[in-house]
Amino acid sequence: MSKKIETHNLGVNHDGNDQYFIEDDDSRGVYATSSGDNVGSKTLLKMISVDEVFAEVFDRHFEKEKIVIKMDCEGGEYQI
């Protein structure tokens, strides 16, 4: 099974545009994609669109094997 698992160090969103994440300097582990007062350290994350993810997966695996996708999309469910 482990030979079939792939991880990717990038984020998934609706349009594939890279996105800044803002870390709350006062609270460890609290991140946001926007902040009302724009306080905190910014990190630019490489993003890929959900359409690109599915296209790649289906191109490589459709009709060859069963497909299971585990994807976290905290806060992006509506747009995706």
Image (spheres, rainbow, N blue to C red):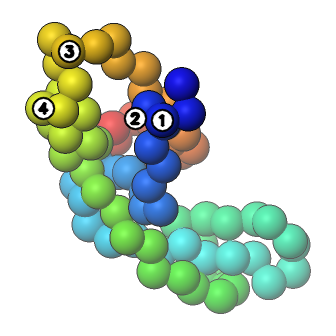
Q: Which residue is mark 4?
A: 59
Residue visible at 33% across and 12% down in the picture? 66
Q: Nearer the viewer, mark 4 or mark 1?
A: 1
Q: Which badge, 4 or 3, comes first in the chain's sequence?
A: 4
Q: Which residue is mark 2?
A: 78
Query: How far separated are the C-alphas under marks 4 and 1?
Result: 18 Å
Residue 42 placement: quadrant: bottom right
Disc 1 crowd rating (10 Å Cα; few below 14, some 14-19, many 20+) is few
Q: Nearer the viewer, mark 2 or mark 1?
A: 1
Which residue type does callout 4 highlight? Asp
Residue 79 placement: quadrant: top left
Which residue type does callout 2 highlight? Tyr
Q: Are marks 4 and 1 in contact (CB under 8 Å)?
A: no
Query: How far separated are the C-alphas under marks 4 and 2?
Result: 25 Å
Q: Which structural element holds mark 1?
A: helix
Q: Which badge, 4 or 1, comes first in the chain's sequence?
A: 1
Q: Which structural element holds mark 2?
A: loop
Disc 2 crowd rating (10 Å Cα; few below 14, some 14-19, many 20+) is few
Q: Which residue is mark 3?
A: 64
